[in-house]
Amino acid sequence: MSALVRKNLSCSFWKNIAHGRKSHVSSTHSLLYFCTSTDGQPLSGVSVFDFLLHKHNFSPEVVSKVASVLTRLKNPEESDSILSFLKETGFSNAQLEKIVKYRPRFLSARLDDSIKPKIKIFQDLGLSSDEIAKMISSNPAILHLSANNNIIPSLSVLKGLLGSNHEVGKLLMLSAWFVTSDLEKTMVPNVEFLKSCGIPMERINMLIYNYPRCLLLHPEIIKQSVSKAQELGVDRDSCLFMRIYAQEQEIWVRLRKKAPSLFSGCHKELEIKGKS
């Protein structure tokens, strides 16, 4: 008799479980994906390769590169939430691949505490979803900066120089480097130096928009370029002066992109010369 009771209870239990599964298939599918392997065994973490390739349709090339750095996800549901949120925000798969490939541990970030606040900053600035996706995917380091210590101070400096959020947004679409650079050590002293040379802010603004990265160079490089233009006998008030100056800066920008280690060495040398 007791055996029969146990059998009936067991059957009733599994029927209830089965019924519960049917009513919650959509909500538990991702949980099963995250918590079990293909043979039904529980996992201590999810394979990054499987997660990106099958769950989010990343290309095999990108998946292999990311998986070589990060093999498993400790919190796959959070990683899934991050990628899903960015997709809903307007990021394409190709843009997400750039972001994850840049620093795979981005998948371990905190969505509510880290990612969402940064996206909102740029939304409040007036940038569209497409513009935000384009800017961040062109410079994924933005998502690894501190919102309070880096992003907001940089945007405040830009607004102080340019006058409005609209102008700041327009500049960021030309170069996202303005978010990731320390403007207090580059752009601000460079602008002040050019103003001290008698160059009006109107022309400096033209320089900012036409050659945006020029003012992010080391201040000593800026001074050398101005000196060279003066040696050529070019009047500071002329358009030719600004053109020569800008061309000099473009050379340094190209060098910085092609050989950053050499550029870093130049900074140290210039600092030594400046102190001597």
Image (tube, grey):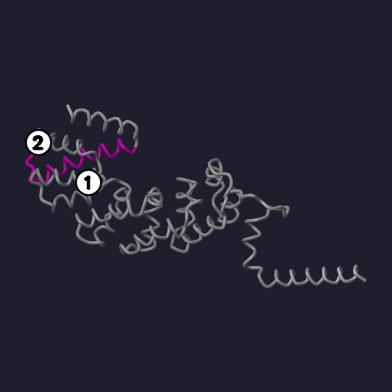
Q: Is residue 110 above or below residue 181?
A: below
Location of mark 1 (residue): 187
- Report if residue 247 lies within the magenta region: yes
As drawn, the label of residue 108 is: none
Q: Which residues are magenta?
A: 233-257
- Which secondary structure type mostly characterizes the magenta part of the structure? helix
Mark 1 belongs to which amino acid? Met
* Quarter of the image that includes the C terminus: top left
| x, y percent for residue 274 | 18, 31
Which of pointers 1 and 2 lies earlier in the amino acid sequence?
A: 1
Q: Does residue 8 appear left or right of residue 177 in this picture? A: right
| x, y percent for residue 153 | 28, 53
| x, y percent for residue 267 | 26, 33
Pointer 1 local density, CA inside 10 Å: few below 14, some 14–19, many at least 20: many
Depth order, front residue of 182/236: 182
Mark 2 belongs to which amino acid? Gln
Pointer 2 local density, CA inside 10 Å: few below 14, some 14–19, many at least 20: some
Location of mark 2 (residue): 230
